Image: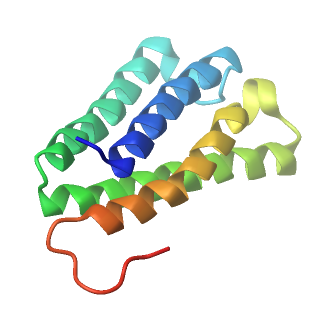
């Protein structure tokens, strides 16, 4: 299947994995509250959900494209949030680690949304450029 949406979706999933590792490496503040096991369990679930969306995007299910938009938007906002919080507080380690991969998520979010919209089954109207 030749699809830019799938390519950008895979890039977002890779950035998502990198983001979790960066949060662990930088000791994201929530790790101190829920521990590594809880953090990995929650993030494992939060990773498997968009993987399931991708499966249904590959099956060309329209609803999965809409959920893909939400995933891309959430990850882009999360990436922005990590950076803003780090700048405002001045705390990366033991604070708001995740900004470097967050920038990647922010950059990938827009083309992912754009290509999901262009390739959505049954889409009406002009293509977004």
Quadrant containing the N terminus is top left
Left or right of residue 125: residue 64: left
Between residue 52 and residue 9, name the one nearer to us. 9
Place of residue 116 in the rendered image (x, y in percent of width and height, measured from the top left):
34, 60
When asked about the image quadrant of residue 25, the answer is top right
Decide: is 60 above or below 17.
below
| Residue in view at x 42 percent, y 19 percent | 40
Total marks drawn? 0
Give the percent coordinates (x, y) of residue 55.
17, 39
Q: Is residue 49 left or right of residue 29?
A: left
Vertical relation: 67 (above or below) 44: below
Q: Residue furthest front?
A: 2
Q: Measured from the top left, where is residue 44 in percent x and y? A: 34, 24
Q: Is 10 situated left or right of 29 in this image?
A: left
Which quarter of the picture shows residue 21?
top right
Asked whether 4 or 100 is in front, the reply is 4
Residue at the far right in the pictured view = 90
Residue drawn at the location 85% of the way across and 51% of the way down:
88
Protein image colouring: rainbow
Residue at x 27% of width, y 31% of height: 48
Residue 101: x percent and y percent?
64, 34
The residue drawn where x is 42% and y is 12% is 37
| Viewer-closest of 18 and 20 | 18
């Amino acid at each position: 299947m030749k699809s830019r949406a799938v390519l950008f979706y895979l890039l977002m999933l890779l950035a998502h994995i990198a983001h979790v590792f960066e949060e662990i490496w930088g000791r994201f503040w929530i790790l101190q509250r829920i521990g590594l096991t809880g953090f990995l369990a929650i993030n494992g679930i939060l990773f498997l959900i968009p993987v399931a969306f991708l499966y249904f995007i590959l099956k060309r299910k329209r609803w999965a494209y809409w959920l893909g938009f939400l995933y891309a938007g959430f990850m882009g906002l999360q990436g922005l949030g990590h950076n803003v919080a780090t700048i405002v507080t001045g705390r990366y380690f033991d604070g708001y680690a995740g900004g470097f991969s967050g920038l990647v998520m922010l950059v990938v979010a827009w083309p992912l949304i754009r290509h999901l919209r262009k390739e959505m089954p049954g889409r009406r109207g002009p293509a977004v450029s």
